[in-house]
Image (cartoon, rainbow, N blue to C red):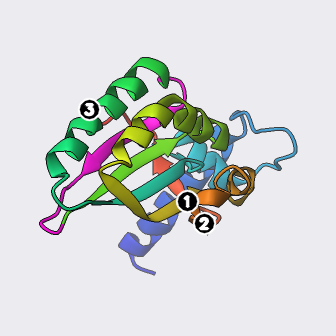
């Protein structure tokens, strides 16, 4: 065996021992068995992704672009004032040349999303005078999506359950 091969094997062994011994002290949720991969995830910059996202796509009505665009800052102001604990991100993209705007929004839970809809209901009704929702996607953990099916049924959204194993970076990107 070559020395570099032996050094590589030794490095891998030492890394695994370090991860295993360090992870032995990492707190795990009740009912979760010790799992080196999960423990390594807990120590890293990554965490399980459980964000619930709502992605409405609006089509601005002919001649209503300025009126619709004036409503958007009102949404953001309401979110800033009332959703600090439940909203992960919020903002609009567009309009495109053909008059489409998408809202990018993420919440810590289904309840957070429902709180948002209650919070912005009046402004949403104002915005819907100058635009239509032409597509609505709801994405997140399956158990959270189930909580939204009844309250959102009138919007006929498409639900996308999160594939198990999804992760998000817990670093602060500011």
**Which one is in front, 134 or 40?**
134
Q: Is residue 155 magenta?
A: no
Residue closest to the far bottom: 1
Q: Residue at x 52, y 55 (%)?
A: 167
Q: Residue at x 35, y 44 (%)?
A: 127
The residue wearing badge 1 is 139
Can residue 36 be spotted in the picture?
Answer: yes
Residue furthest left in the image: 97
Mark 1, secondary structure of its residue: strand
Mark 1 or mark 2: which comes first in sequence? 1
Q: Nearer the viewer, residue 31 or 142?
A: 142
Residue beneath disc 2: 159
Magenta range is 84-98
Q: Which residue is mark 3?
A: 73
Q: Nearer the viewer, residue 115 or 109?
A: 115
Residue sticking out furthest to the top:
81
* Contact (Cβ within 8 Å) of mark 1 with mark 2: yes
Looking at the image, which is closer to me, 111 or 58? 58
């Amino acid at each position: 065996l070559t020395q570099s091969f032996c050094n590589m094997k030794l490095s891998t062994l030492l890394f695994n021992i370090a991860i295993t011994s360090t992870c032995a002290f990492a707190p795990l949720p009740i009912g979760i068995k010790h799992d080196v991969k999960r423990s390594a995830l807990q120590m890293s910059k990554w965490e399980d992704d459980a964000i619930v996202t709502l992605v409405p796509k609006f089509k601005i009505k002919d001649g209503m672009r300025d009126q619709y665009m004036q409503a958007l800052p009102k949404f953001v102001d309401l979110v800033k004032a009332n959703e600090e604990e439940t909203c992960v991100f919020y903002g609009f993209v567009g309009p495109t040349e053909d008059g489409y705007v998408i809202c990018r929004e993420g919440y810590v839970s289904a309840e957070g999303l429902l709180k948002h809809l209650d919070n912005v209901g009046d402004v949403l009704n104002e915005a819907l005078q100058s635009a239509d929702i032409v597509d609505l996607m709801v994405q997140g953990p399956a158990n959270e999506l189930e909580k939204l099916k009844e309250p959102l049924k009138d919007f006929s959204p498409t639900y996308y359950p999160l594939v198990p194993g999804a992760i998000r970076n817990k670093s602060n990107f500011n």
